[in-house]
Amino acid sequence: MREKGFSLVTVIVLAVILFLAAAGGAYYYLKLTGKSPYGKVETTPVTTSQETPISASKDSATINKELNATTIDSVDADIKSLEASASSL
């Protein structure tokens, strides 16, 4: 009886090792050919034509000018733009 239990454990261990080797080989092959779903995902930043670059100025007059030029209502337009670009995916 002890031999049957030992052979069953051996078969299970060998099956697990074989499964892991096959999974590792498939992952390596897909990674090598560039078809792996776990590769790098390239994204492009979403920008609008209304955006202006942020200045590095520490002058309070320049900062006040930039803050006053900021429009709060543009958030709705930004959200609509994001929704439109997300729906095209």
Image: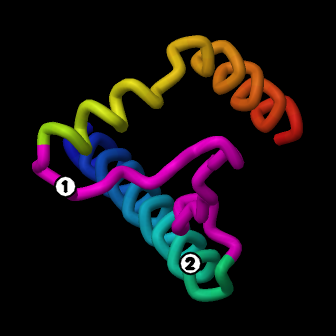
Observer-nearest residue: 46 or 41? 46
Name the residue: 49% across, 60% down. Answer: 19
Query: Can you tell which quarter of the image residue 55 is in?
Result: bottom left
Name the residue: 71% across, 21% down. Answer: 77
Name the residue: 75% across, 21% down. Answer: 80
Q: Is residue 46 above or below residue 43?
A: above
Q: Amino acid at mark 1?
A: Ser
Farthest residue toward the right? 88
Observer-nearest residue: 23 or 66? 66
Observer-nearest residue: 62 or 39? 62
Q: Is residue 32 above or below residue 77?
A: below
The spot of residue 16 in percent (x, y) is 40, 54
Q: CA distance from mark 2 to mark 1?
A: 46 Å
Q: Dot 1, crowdedness within 10 Å: few (<14), some or many (≥20)?
A: few
The region drawn magenta spans 35-59
Where is mark 2, residue-wise?
31
Residue 37 lies in the magenta stretch: yes
Observer-nearest residue: 75 or 19? 75
Q: Amino acid at mark 2?
A: Lys
Residue 57 is labelled as 1
